[in-house]
Amino acid sequence: MSSSAMIFSLAGIGLCSIGLFGFMLHTHLIRKLLAFNIMGSGVFLLLVGMAQRSGQADPVPQALVLTGIVVAVSATALALYLIRRWLQLCASTELPEDDYR
């Protein structure tokens, strides 16, 4: 594995870890959405980092990452709309605590 592929892969693993930690830690919906987007960016970096064949980039995973970015932007816009609607209905941007009784 080349050094640039290793850097992309390690950065992707780091972003996925930070995003997962933020997603589990926060109850605020906007922060959860940001953490989820950071996790998605980490997955994109992993795909780009692992898509190296003998020093040259493979175009298929790059096309998948480009498509994934478009889908992620659309999903983020939908999530922001749903969070805004939740704010209008419940007057809060945090999820209620679960009762496990």
Image (tube, rainbow, N blue to C red):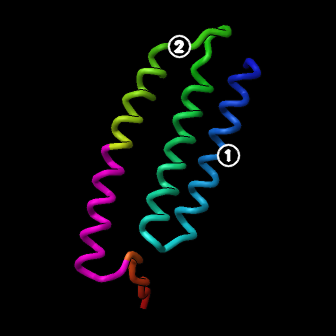
Give how far apart the Cα atoms at labels 2 and 1 are: 23 Å
Q: Quadrant of the C terminus?
A: bottom left
- 10 or 31: nearer the eye? 31
**Residue 1 higher or lower than 95, as above or below:** above
- Give the vertical position of 92 relative to 56 (above or below): below
- Could you say where residue 44 lies in the image, as x and y percent from the top left? 52, 35
Q: Tell me: 66 left or right of 12.
A: left
Q: Residues within 10 Å of mark 2 (few under 14, many from 20)?
A: some
Residue 16: percent from left, percent from top? 59, 48
Q: Which residues are magenta?
A: 74-92
Choose top left, top right, bottom left or bottom right for residue 66: top left
Of all residues, the one furthest to the right in this rendering is: 3
Residue labelled with disc 1 = 14
Give the percent coordinates (x, y) of residue 87. Answer: 30, 75
Q: Kindly report the secondary structure that dominates the magenta region of the rendered protein.
A: helix
Residue 86 lies in magenta, yes or no? yes
Q: Secondary structure at mark 2?
A: loop
Q: Quadrant of residue 49?
A: top right
Q: Which mark is residue 58?
A: 2
